[in-house]
Image (spheres, rainbow, N blue to C red):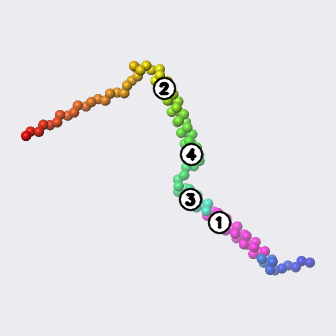
Amino acid sequence: MQRDNPLLDGLARLLTDAAGAAEGARSEVETFMKQKLEKLIAEMKLVGREEFDAVKAMAAKARAENERLETRLAALERRTPAKRRRAAPKKRRIPAKPRPTRKL
């Protein structure tokens, strides 16, 4: 025959309640920390992954386009004779204004 021990029953209830309270406290601390971290990240103005990937793709496309245009320009320069290549325009000289003479 089993006898109920009120001391052990009370201790078991106390431990169960303490475990529940610890779980609740852990959940509250976790929620609080998550909110603080999200606020910190928002204040840092970090770029999202989608934006980063989009800009990275745009940069790769621009780099490829530049390489393609460089190759095309080099081919055109090889086909054009040196005589026909247009030199940079010469700068026009603006005549200096005559200085006023001083009478003594």
Which residue was labeled with disc 3?
39
Query: Mark 3 and 2 residues: CB-CB less than 8 Å, in contact?
Result: no
Which of the marked residues, 1 or 4, is nearer the chain's N terminus? Answer: 1
On the image, the x and y values in percent for residue 94 come to: 25, 31
Q: Does 20 lie within the magenta span?
A: yes
Helix, strand or loop at mark 2: helix
The local crowd at label 2, few if under 14, some if 14 to 19, many if 20 or more residues have their Cα within 10 Å, is few
Callout 1: SS? helix
Q: Quadrant of the N terminus?
A: bottom right
Please tell me which of labels 2 and 4 falls first in the chain. Answer: 4
For the record, the magenta segment spans 12-32
The image quadrant of residue 8 is bottom right
**In the displayed structure, does residue 70 sit left or right of residue 20?**
left
- The answer to whether the residue labelled 1 contacts the one labelled 4, judged by CB atoms less than 8 Å apart, is no
The amino acid sitting under disc 2 is Ala
Q: Name the residue under label 2.
A: 74
**Mark 4 sits on what residue?**
52
Q: Residue furthest right?
A: 1
Residue 51 versus residue 9 in the image, above or below: above
Q: Where is residue 46 in the image (x, y as percent from the top left)?
A: 54, 52
Q: Distance between the residues labelled 2 and 4?
A: 33 Å
Give the residue pinned by disc 1.
Answer: 28
Of mark 4 and mark 3, the one earlier in the sequence is 3
Residue type at mark 3: give it: Lys
Q: In which quarter of the image is residue 102?
A: top left
Mark 4, secondary structure of its residue: helix
Mark 4 nearby-residue class (10 Å; few <14, some 14–19, many ≥20): few
- What amino acid does circle 1 point to? Glu
